[in-house]
Each structure stands twice: as C-alpha cells, then as structure tokens.
C-alpha cells in the first residue's frame, strides 16, 4: 500500500492485488503477445486470454468507469488509477478494446434509451460483440452530411438500402452503428443514427486490400435490410449531433497515449543504427536536431493528451479541441515513423522476405499504415477547418 493513500484507496489496492493474483493467468504476463488484440482483425483465441476476458468482464473492470447496471465497474477515478497501476505492475492489459468500447459505448451512455443501454452495453463490456462504424460512403467522406444510404419508414421498422465504404473491421463485426438518411429534403437535419445487426439478411461486407498488405476495412452493402425502429438512437432526423459527438470520442481516442504505436522504440533504433562521434553523440547534427525536436513535440503531445483525458473524465468536454489533439498526435506518430525508416537505411527498404530483419519489415508496414492516420476520423484538412471555424472563430472559406 502507498503510504500517502487514504484508507479507502489503500484497501481497494489490496482488494485489486488479491483479485488479480487469483484471476490473471500468469502465462499472459510471460508472453505479452498472448494478450494482443487486433481490433480490426480476427479474435485472439488463446485460451488463457479468453479466460482473462471472461473474468475481467464479469468483474466489470474492462470498463471500470461505466455504471454497474451496464456491465461496468462503477469505480471512482481514484480507484481506476489504482486498477490501472496494479494491472500495469503485473503486465496485465485490458482485453476489451476497439470501437465497441471506445466509440459506441460512450455514445450510447449519453444518447441511448435505457433499453438500448441494457441490451448493448453489457455484452460490449464483456467483449462479446464487435461493432463497426457505418459513416463514410463513396460520395460522402469529408462532406459526411451528404450521405445517401436510405432508411425508409415501414411502420415498426426501417428498410435500409445503400452502401458504406472504408468500414473498419466490418468483416468481423456483429453490429454497425450507422448514419442513414431519413429525410431527403434536409442535409444534416435528415440524418438518423441507427444500430444495424450485421447478421441481418441483405448485409454484405467485402474487405478492401491496403498498401501495407492487410485488409482492415470493407465496403458494406445494404440491400432491403429490415431494422426495427427500436434501434433508432435519439430522435428521428436527430442523428447529426450524435454522429459529431461520437467523432469527438474518436478523435480524442486517436490522441490516447495508451495506444500501441510502434513495434520498436525510436531510441532503440537510434542506438542500433545511428553513427556516433567520439563524444558518443549522433554524428549527423541535422538528424540529431530533428530527433530532439521530435522528442520534445511527442512528449508535449503525450502530456497534453493525458491532461485532456483527465479533464474529460472530470466532466470537462474538450469539444472542438479534439481536432487539435488528433492532428498533433498523428503528426508526431508520422514523424516518428519517418525517422525510424530513415535510420533503418537499407533495412528500411524491405517489404517481405528473409533479406531483411523481421523488426525492420514490421516497421516498414507500420510506416505505410501510419499514412492513414491523417485520413481516418476526419482528414487533417478537415480538422484544420474545424479549428479555424470553431476555435479561432474564422469565417467559412468561400469557393
Ligand atoms: C484506415 C482508415 C479507416 C477508416 N475507417 C472508417 C470507418 O470505420 N468507418 C467510416 O465510416 N469511415 C472510415 N474511414 C473513412 C474516413 O473517415 C474517410 O476516408 C475520411 O473522412 C475522408 O473522406 P474521403 O476518403 O471520402 O476523402 P474526401 O472527402 O474525398 O477528401 C479528399 C481530399 O480532399 C480534402 N478535402 C475535402 N474536403 C475539404 C475541405 N472542405 N477543405 C479542405 N480540404 C478538403 C481532404 O482533406 C482529402 O485530402 C477510414 C479511413 C481510413 C483511411
């Protein structure tokens, strides 16, 4: 127990330690790869990982801040700090990650009906269902409000016809939170937010192949898909406000410092590949200056993200400032990956095969994958538009 802790927090720490000692499978600590979660790929089926997920989910500690009636732990901020610290101490990670828990969960907590929360949140907390985000369409990306996927009123249900694109993880998702057009006469005011069961007849997800070799997203087609009206979140034609709030969760999540960003730490790559002078400094003064500038930026971004996350939990809404966070975090990520590739030199030219070290090949793929950071969640330019309009108060650019 930490000597500076109050009695309640200290007692909770002991409770957490005991519980983890009994419930966290030690085989996972010995080999962190066994806890890996690919949020847009296949499930991790390691038996100990699955056991850990069931146990932590049943305890409500996969979503420790959520109310207990929705499958959460109902913990205070101080208790969450303790839980996070104790899990970190023994190498335990949260087995429930991704859009379900980070985007859909907080949005339903804010806008969902009691029935929707009770139906959808507990399975999310237990990591039993995966959700995808049906926002973008072939003709509606940055200008999202021009989306055309149609939901026709059929009494107790909607009949959905249309197409989504770039839908991450749709090929593994059970459900989709989806923006649909319910009024063709109004733009933003004609959009509704609905929950679609991906196993419904008429839903088809086709994976799209990316430049780094993987397929994390899909085209999704809806043909005469019947969706009960009970799956409408909020008001009919009131989906735009919900969609924007969810994007704020997405952008602040992109700035979440706990994300795994790289197989290799930049400092390790510098040590292995850098050329050093007789004083032990990097010989290339220009590279040295760029590395130092990046380290300072990355540290400032990480600390700002931490501050905003804490403020968020204390009820202070970062609002449009999430756009600044998104751009700054992605820029720092991309700079780090560029520096790694530059340092790798010849090893950074590999794509596949035995001629290159495995870690270098993974770095190249991450560097390529990182290019998408300034596109998803709203492009870099769109964030700049939001910053100029909503934060700086500048007028809209006229064509
Ligand atoms: C890896 C990845 C995962 C994704 N996952 C999902 C997902 O799960 N669900 C989902 O719905 N979508 C997803 N997307 C789609 C993403 O949200 C869109 O790609 C993004 O909103 C941009 O839309 P677009 O691709 O249609 O580009 P466009 O909107 O056609 O933009 C093309 C270019 O024009 C610029 N531009 C457009 N309008 C303006 C303007 N007004 N001012 C200045 N510049 C402008 C853009 O910045 C961009 O550079 C994902 C994308 C990627 C790359």
Image: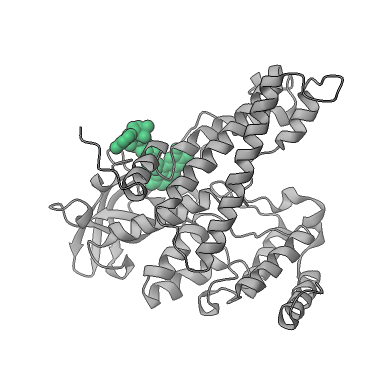
Is 180 rendered above or below residue 164? below
The one nearer the camera, 197 or 216, is: 216
Q: Residue at x 33, y 67 (%)?
A: 231
Q: Quadrant of the C terminus?
A: top left
Tell which residue pokes out farthest to the right in this image: 278
Please say whether residue 107 is visible from this viewpoint. Answer: yes
Q: How is the image coloured?
A: one colour
Examine the image and state in which quarter residue 180 appears: bottom left
35 to the left or right of 167: right
288 to the left or right of 297: right
Is 234 rendered above or below residue 9? above
244 to the left or right of 315: left
Residue 281, given in percent of the width and then of the height, sits at 80, 25
Residue 315, given in percent of the width and then of the height, sits at 48, 68
**Which quarter of the frame holds ligand 1?**
top left
The one nearer the camera, 362 or 254, is: 254
Examine the image and state in which quarter residue 238 appears: bottom left
Q: Residue at x 20, y 56 (%)?
A: 190
Residue 10, given in percent of the width and then of the height, sits at 76, 78
Q: Quadrant of the N terminus?
A: bottom right
The one nearer the camera, 64 or 217, is: 64
Please say whether residue 200 is visible from this viewpoint. Answer: no
Q: Residue at x 52, y 40 (%)?
A: 330
The one nearer the camera, 300 or 347, is: 300
Tell which residue pokes out farthest to the left in this image: 185
Q: Residue at x 33, y 66 (%)?
A: 233
Tell which residue pokes out farthest to the bottom in this image: 7
Is 235 rendered above or below residue 359? below
Residue 388, given in percent of the width and then of the height, sits at 34, 43
């Amino acid at each position: 127990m930490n000597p500076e802790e109050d009695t309640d927090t200290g007692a909770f720490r002991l409770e957490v330690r005991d519980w983890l000692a009994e419930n966290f499978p030690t085989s996972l600590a010995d080999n962190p790869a066994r806890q890996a979660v690919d949020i847009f790929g296949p499930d991790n089926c390691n038996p100990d990982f699955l056991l850990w997920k069931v146990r932590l989910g049943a305890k409500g500690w996969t979503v420790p801040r959520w109310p207990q009636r929705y499958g959460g732990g109902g913990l205070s901020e101080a208790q969450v700090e303790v839980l996070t610290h104790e899990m970190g101490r023994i190498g335990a990670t949260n087995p429930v990650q991704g859009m379900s828990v980070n985007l859909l969960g907080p949005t339903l907590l804010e806008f969902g009906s009691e029935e929707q929360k009770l139906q959808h949140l507990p399975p999310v907390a237990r990591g039993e269902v995966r959700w995808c985000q049906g926002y973008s369409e072939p003709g509606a990306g940055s200008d999202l409000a021009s989306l055309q996927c149609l939901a026709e009123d059929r009494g107790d249900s909607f009949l959905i016809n249309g197409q989504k694109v770039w839908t991450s993880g749709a090929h593994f998702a059970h459900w989709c939170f989806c923006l649909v057009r319910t009024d063709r006469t109004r733009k933003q005011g004609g959009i509704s937010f609905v929950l679609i069961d991906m196993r419904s007849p008429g839903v088809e997800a086709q994976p799209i192949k990316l430049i780094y070799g993987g397929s994390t997203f899909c085209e999704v087609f809806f043909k005469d898909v019947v969706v009960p009206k009970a799956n409408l979140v909020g008001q009919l034609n009131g989906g735009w406000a919900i969609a924007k709030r969810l994007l704020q969760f997405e952008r602040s999540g992109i700035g979440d410092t706990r994300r795994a960003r790289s197989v290799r730490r930049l400092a390790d790559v510098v040590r292995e590949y850098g050329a050093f002078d007789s004083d032990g400094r990097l010989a290339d003064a220009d590279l040295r200056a760029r590395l130092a500038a990046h380290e300072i930026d990355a540290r400032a971004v990480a600390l700002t993200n931490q501050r905003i996350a804490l403020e968020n939990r204390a009820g202070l809404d970062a609002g449009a400032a999430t756009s600044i966070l998104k751009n700054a975090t992605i820029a720092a990520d991309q700079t780090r990956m560029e520096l790694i590739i530059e340092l790798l030199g010849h090893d950074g030219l590999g794509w596949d095969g035995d001629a290159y070290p495995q870690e270098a090949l993974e770095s190249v793929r991450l560097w390529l994958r990182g290019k998408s950071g300034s596109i998803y969640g709203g492009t870099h330019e769109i964030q700049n538009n939001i910053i100029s309009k909503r934060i700086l108060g500048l007028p809209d650019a006229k064509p």
